[in-house]
Image (cartoon, grey):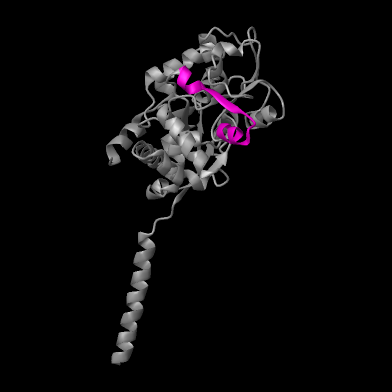
Amino acid sequence: MKRYALFLLVVVFLIAALLLGGCGKKELIKIRLNEVTHSVFYAPQYVALNEGFFREEGLEIELINGAGADKVMTAVLAGQAEIGFAGPEAAIYVYNEGKEDYAVVFAQLTKRDGSFLVGRQPEPDFKWTDLKGKYIIGGRKGGVPLMTLEYVMKNHGVIPGVDAEVDTSVQFALMAGAFTGGLGDYVALFEPTASMLEREGKGYVVASIGKESGEIPYTAYFAKKSYIEKNPEIIQKFTNAIYKGQLWVESHTPEEIAKSIKPSFPDTDEEILIAVAKRYKEQDTWNKDPIMKKEALDRLQEVMKTAGELKQEAPYEKIVTTEFAQRAIQQVKK
C-alpha cells in the first residue's frame, strides 16, 4: 500500500508539473513583417531579431522582402502582412486616395536617406555638378529614394531631365544589375550592395545622398488603422522590440553591430558589414527612438511637393500615431 501511495504521489506530481509547465509557456504571436528591401540600413531591426528582442515581447517575426514601398503597402492593405516597413510616403499616398482603412505610421527607424551614389571610377574630388550631362539610374518614380536624389541634385543646381538624365524605369531590386550590365554613368544604391560593388571593382561610392539631404523620415513601420485599433497590445510589443534594437545599436560599436546582424546577411563578408555599419553610424542614420515628429513629416512632404509628386499634404494627426513609441520609451529600460 505504501508503494502504491508513493507511486500515486509521483504520478500526481508529474502531472501537476506538466500542467504548470504548459500554463507557464506562452505561444509566440506570429507577425508577418513586409520590408521594403533587405539592407544593413535597417540594422536596428535585425539586431532586434537576432538579439531576441521580439521573442522577449512574445512575437515571432516572419520577414518578407517586398522589394519596393508600393509592393509593401499593397501587401498590408490586402492583409498579406500585418505590418509594413517602408517610406512613409506610401501612407501619404494611400490616405490621399481616400481609403477608409488607411495605413497609420506608428514607429520610425531611420532619419536619413540610406543610399549612396555609385560611379564607374573612383572620384575622391566628386562634386554634384559633375552629374551634368550624365545618365543616372535613380529608382522608382514616386519613391523617396528618387525624390531625395533629385532634391539633392536640384540643391546643387543640377536639374533632373534638363542637366542630367535620371532613369526611373529600372525596378529597385534590379538597379545594381543594370549598372554592372553597362547601363548609366551612376546609380543610387543601398548597402551592402554599394560596398559589395566596390569590393568587386564594379563600382565606387562617390557621395552619400543621406549626408547631403539632411534629416528626413526615411523608413517607418505602419499597419492598417483597423489592425492597430484591434491589436494595440501587438503594436506595443512590436514597438518595444524596435526601441530595444535602437538602444542596442546606439550603445554598441560597428564591429558589435556587424556581428549581431551577420545571421541576417550570411552571404556578406563581415568586414563589409563593419564598414557599412561604421558609415551609417557616422552619418547619424538611425533614430534614437521610434517617435516620428511632425516637423519630420512636414519636411518629407515638402520634398515630395518639390518633386511634383504631392498636391495635397496628409495631416500628421491622421497618418501618424506616437502613443506606442512614447509608451515604449517609458516601458523599456535603458
Residue 85 in percent (x, y) is at: 50, 33
Q: Quadrant of the N terminus?
A: bottom left
Residue 152 location in percent, x, y? 52, 14
- Residue 139 percent across, percent down from the top left: 61, 23
Of 302 and 149, nearer the camera is 149
197 in the magenta segment = yes
Asked if residue 173 is positioned above or below residue 30 in the image, the reply reads: above
Q: Is residue 292 visible?
A: yes
Q: Nearer the viewer, residue 44 or 299?
A: 44
The image quarter containing residue 79 is: top right
Residue 27 position (above or below residue 139): below
Report whether 202 appears left or right of 19. right
Q: Nearer the viewer, residue 312 or 12?
A: 312
Q: Which residues are magenta?
A: 194-213
Corner quadrant of residue 186 = top right
Above or below for 200 versus 97? below
Asked if residue 181 lies left or right of residue 317, the reply is right
What count of labels does the image hold? 0
Q: Toward which corner of the image does residue 200 lie, by quadrant? A: top right
Q: Main secondary structure of the magenta part?
A: helix
Q: Is residue 313 visible?
A: no
Residue at x-position 30% and y-position 86%: 6
- Residue at image x 67%, y 27%? 179
Residue shown at 32%/32% (left/top)?
A: 326
* Residue 100 in picture, x, y percent from top left: 51, 25
- The reply to whether the magenta stretch includes residue 225 is no
